[in-house]
C-alpha cells in the first residue's frame, strides 16, 4: 500500500512567524486548565470589585449542512 502524500493525511497546523523563531512548546491540558481557571478567577474578582468591563458577543460560526 502506497502512503498518501497530499490532502488531509499530510496536513500540518499553520505556523505563524513573529520575527524570531520560537521553539515548539507542548503544554499539558492540566496546565492549560489551571491557567484558564486562574484567568477566569482574576476576571471575576476584577468585576466583583467594580472594575470596568465590556461584554463582547462571540460571533456565531455558520453551520454547514450537507446538500442532499
Image (cartoon, rainbow, N blue to C red):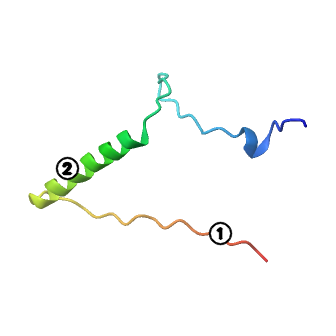
Secondary element type, mark 1: loop
Residue at 59% across / 38% down in the picture?
Answer: 14
Q: How many marks?
A: 2
Q: Is residue 27 left or right of residue 14?
A: left
Residue farthest to the left? 49
- Quarter-of-image position of residue 5: top right
Q: Is residue 45 left or right of residue 40?
A: left
Image height of 3 relative to 54, above or below: above
| Residue, disc 1 | 64
Residue at 19% across / 57% down in the picture?
Answer: 44
Q: Is residue 32 left or right of residue 67?
A: left
* Spot occupied by residue 32 in the image (x, y as percentages of width and height): 37, 42
Image height of 23 relative to 36, above or below: above
Q: Which is nearer the eye, 34 or 6?
A: 34
Residue at 26% across / 53% down in the picture?
Answer: 40
Which of pointers 2 and 1 lies earlier in the amino acid sequence? Answer: 2
Residue at 47% across / 22% down in the picture?
Answer: 20
* Spot occupied by residue 66 in the image (x, y as percentages of width and height): 73, 71
Position of the C terminus by quadrant: bottom right
Q: Which is nearer the eye, 62 or 48?
A: 48
Image height of 27 relative to 36, above or below: above
Q: Is residue 24 left or right of residue 35?
A: right
Q: Which is nearer the eye, 30 or 27?
A: 30
Disc sitting over residue 42 in the figure: 2
Amino acid at each position: 500500500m502506497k502512503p498518501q502524500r497530499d490532502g488531509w493525511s499530510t496536513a500540518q497546523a499553520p505556523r505563524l512567524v513573529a520575527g524570531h523563531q520560537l521553539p515548539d512548546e507542548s503544554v499539558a491540558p492540566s496546565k492549560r486548565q489551571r491557567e484558564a481557571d486562574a484567568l477566569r478567577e482574576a476576571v471575576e474578582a476584577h468585576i466583583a470589585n467594580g472594575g470596568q468591563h465590556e461584554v463582547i458577543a462571540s460571533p456565531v460560526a455558520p453551520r454547514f449542512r450537507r446538500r442532499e
